[in-house]
Amino acid sequence: MSEQTDPRDDYEHHGGFPVYEPVKAGPDFGRFVEALRRLQDLAVSTHAPDDVITRAIEQAEALGDLLEPYRVPEGRSPAGFNPDLPGRGSLLMLPWTIEKYDAESVRSRGVFRLFHRGGNGAAHGGTLPLLFDDLFGMIVHAAGHPIARTGYLHVNYRKITPLETELVVEGRVDRVEGRKIFCSAELRDTEGTLLADCEALMIQLLPGQP
């Protein structure tokens, strides 16, 4: 009888990804990330006098100097590894909170903030593929598939996506063909109005593939 292997072992070692152990955030990390997001909002929504900008530069540079000695390699920071925090504690990802995560589907809820603005009160069109792409990565994982890279995203923009308004995105795996994992998702407001939908092809990595 052949030796049984743990499916999780296949997931963690598939492709050229190293095995990352999630880094638990400290009690103030969520507050730290939110403070930085607030600065991003203010950076695109204020028109301060030159002397205030000069002071802000000095303080921002001082903050960078404070944090620089604690720079760590990929996989050693809590950013992106904490699903209980908006955006999992990552500044790149939209600050949305996961509210459903299982093999059937993944659902997340949140808002597009001021620093996501494209124009005329709407979210920038380029932020929607980021939202969907991040969601599909979680969907593949939740459905028990090994690590995959994005083959393509096809986004349909149905209505204007508003800023600072609670929205919901949900998606699932539709079918699997060998290494190809086909997914779909929808972005809606809290009344159920469809704002955008997306279809994606996620491709399971080959051993050693980055």
Image (cartoon, helix red, strand yellow):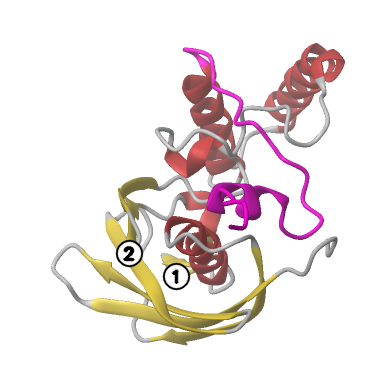
- Which element is circle 2 on? loop
Count of all numbered marks drawn on residues in the image: 2
Query: Looking at this view, is 183 or 48 the one in front?
Result: 183
Question: First in sequence: mark 2 or mark 1?
Answer: 2
- Is residue 161 visible in the rendered structure shown here? no
What's the residue at 72%, 30% (across, down)?
A: 53
Residue 188 found in image quarter: bottom left
In which quadrant will I find the N terminus?
bottom right
- Which element is circle 1 on? loop
Query: Looking at this view, is 207 or 169 the one in front?
Result: 207
Residue 65 found in image quarter: top right
What residue is disc 2 on?
105
Position of 3 with respect to 166 (left or right) is right
User: In whole angstroms, how far apart are the C-alphas of marks 2 and 1?
Assistant: 33 Å
What's the residue at 68%, 25% (across, down)?
A: 52
Across and down, in percent, residue 194 comes to: 26, 79
Image: 12 above or below 124? above
Image: 177 above or below 37? below
Across and down, in percent, residue 82 comes to: 50, 33
Q: Residues within 10 Å of mark 1 (few under 14, many from 20)?
A: few
Across and down, in percent, residue 152 comes to: 63, 83
Across and down, in percent, residue 7 comes to: 55, 53
In which quadrant will I find the C terminus?
bottom right
What's the residue at 54%, 38% (across, down)?
A: 42
What residue is disc 1 on?
120
Query: Looking at this view, is 55 or 67 the one in front?
Result: 67
37 part of magenta stretch: no
- Which residues lie in the magenta part? 1-28
Q: Amino acid at mark 2?
A: Ser
Q: Residues within 10 Å of mark 2 (few under 14, many from 20)?
A: some
